[in-house]
Amino acid sequence: MGRADTHLHTHFSGFNQLGNAMKFPESVITPETQLDQMRRLGYQVLAITDHDEIAGAFQGEKYARKFGDIDLIVGEEVTTLDGEIIGLFLTEKVPRGLSVEETVDIIRSQGGIVIAPHPFSFHVPGLQEKILALDIDGFETVNGGHPDYYSNMFARKVMDAYPGRWADLAGSDAHSVYTAGTCWTEFEGNSADDFRDSILKRKTRGCGKAADPFTQVQWSMEVVIGGQKLLMDKLRNRLEIAEGDQLAQKIDRISRLMAGTGIIAGSAYLFPPITCLATALSLLYLRRGSKRMTAKMDERLERIGRIIEGIDSGVPYDDGEKMFQVRNKRIEKAAKKLDG
């Protein structure tokens, strides 16, 4: 059986925002570094799926040609108005900010595979019950970036309840080498073409577990230190900007004063008490969220059953039980964020 990681990020993923003020890099590692790590771990296939960008994937694909033991798939984790979705085997960048249905159509027009990452997450933009009626090939039952005990567990329950309906996948969602390698997708064969065939035949299996919370801390420290280095390059007029590198482009646009402030703020985060406090608060949030969601799990599984029964019987899909209103509010919020 081959091993694949279908969800990896590089510095081409740009930056994220915490609250209204603090921005930080999604990743500071290169596509080449991700591929080297996958080779060390014995994987046969990987997909670079940066946020709303494929330049890094193309760069990694070129590097992968030097080796005969691993294939790299060009992918993209696309921000839609309904949540995030992954396209694999892409030839062109998919625009962000569209409805998920429009996004799926664009991926299909390129002959791509459609994957729903972290579909039932309560702390990142998953598609939730929307996946049930979408033209997707599979979804993640293990996402390495979800150490909470609800998100992956619930995805596994939905997958196992309807065998053969979707391809069963696992992706590390690694933004760092520290968070890679804890989960993988098993498939028949050892090439990207074999992997694609296994997805279409629903003969994949998501394996492993989420990354340990401590590795998430290592990632956060890595992006802070890496971000500081880029800010220093900005101040020294040595910043290199590759095509599609959203992170470097963002840093290039900020003022020198903001760059200096970012270096000082990053140093404060690296001070052990701050790092430990941030970790403790994150774990507390995940525990409370998991407890809240688990309490409603049986009711949610029943609702999913009713939705799927309606889809299979030809009844027009309805998000059901106030889901439509919730979806509209999420779309409005996402649209305002994109405009900003």
Image (cartoon, rainbow, N blue to C red):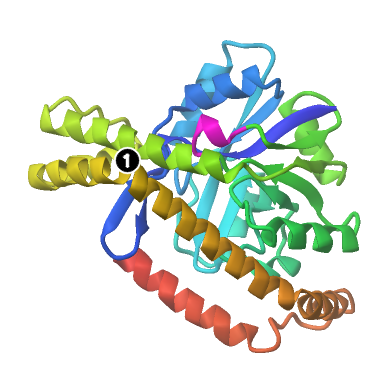
Identity of the residue furthest to the left in this view: 257
Res 185 → quadrant: top right
Q: Position of residue 123 (x, y in %)?
A: 54, 63
Question: In the visual, does 199 lie left or right of 237?
Answer: right
Q: Which residues are magenta?
A: 175-180
Residue at 62% across, 62% down: 121
Query: Looking at this view, is 134 or 337 the one in front?
Result: 337
Picture quarter with the N terminus: top right
Label 1 belongs to which residue?
270
- The front one of 274 and 192 is 274
Q: Quadrant of residue 155?
A: bottom right
Q: Nearer the viewer, residue 87 or 302?
A: 302
Apparent side of residue 156 relative to residue 232 in the rendered image (left or right) = right
Q: Nearer the viewer, residue 23 or 101?
A: 23
Amino acid type shown at disc 1:
Leu
Point out residue 11 in the picture as x, y percentages from the top left corner: 40, 36
